[in-house]
Image (tube, helix red, strand yellow):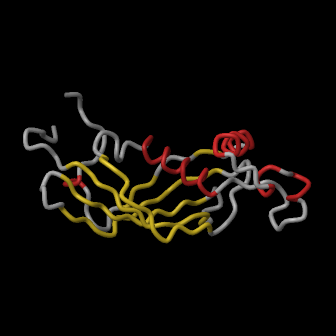
């Protein structure tokens, strides 16, 4: 089996903080997400309409920002080959708009870990905070994920 890049449940402790790389959200991202999702709400797609909103221009869909952050998390290697499932996301809040040209990243703080009854997996609860380039919070949530435990024959070397 090839070497796993991600952290196993056993490697994750309450209080750990993981930060992703950064990615700039483009107008193309916003338009493509509208096409993919079918959400053509004017706040995302109509410049003239948006001139009359507090944002002044189209803003990214909340789920688009969440999706980009999830991709950044994967790219960081934290859960590559060790994540079994996303179990849920609670208290998801859109705190500030994300516009074309904003650069986002995510910081995850481990709040709780719990081994499952099977003993080969564990639930990790994290507070995920997504920031823009000005270090302003744009989204927050609490997510629970199921991670594999380190196989007994796997070593750290």
Identify the residue at the far left of this view. 153
Q: Image point 23% across, 28% down: which residue?
A: 2
Which quadrant, please, contains the N terminus?
top left
Q: Image point 62% across, 65% down: which residue?
A: 136
Percent of width and height locating residue 11:
22, 53
Percent of width and height locating residue 155:
12, 40
Give the image quarter of residue 142. bottom left
As drawn, is 113 to the left or to the right of 110?
Answer: left
As drawn, is 134 to the left or to the right of 11?
Answer: right
Q: Image point 16% across, 46% down: which residue?
A: 150
Whether 49 is drawn above or below 91: the answer is: above
As drawn, is 108 to the left or to the right of 8?
Answer: right
Which quadrant, please, contains the C terminus?
top left
Percent of width and height locating residue 148:
22, 48
Give the image quarter of residue 76. top left
Q: How many marks?
A: 0
Give the image quarter of residue 27. top right
Percent of width and height locating residue 103:
64, 50
Identify the residue at the far top of this view. 1
- Of residues 16 and 113, the one nearer the viewer is 113
């Amino acid at each position: 089996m090839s070497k796993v890049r991600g952290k196993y449940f056993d490697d994750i402790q309450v209080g750990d903080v993981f930060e992703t790389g950064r990615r700039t959200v483009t107008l193309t991202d916003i338009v493509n997400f509208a096409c993919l999702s079918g959400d053509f709400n004017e706040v995302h797609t109509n410049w003239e309409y948006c001139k009359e909103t507090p944002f002044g221009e189209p803003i990214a869909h909340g789920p688009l920002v969440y999706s980009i952050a999830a991709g950044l998390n994967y790219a960081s290697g934290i859960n590559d080959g060790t994540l079994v499932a996303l179990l849920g996301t609670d208290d998801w809040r859109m705190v500030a708009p994300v516009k074309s040209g904003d650069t986002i990243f995510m910081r995850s703080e481990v709040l709780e870990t719990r081994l499952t009854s099977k003993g080969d997996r564990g639930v990790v609860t994290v507070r995920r905070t997504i920031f823009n380039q000005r270090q302003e919070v744009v989204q927050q949530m609490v997510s629970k994920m199921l991670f594999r435990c380190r196989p007994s024959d796997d070593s750290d070397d």
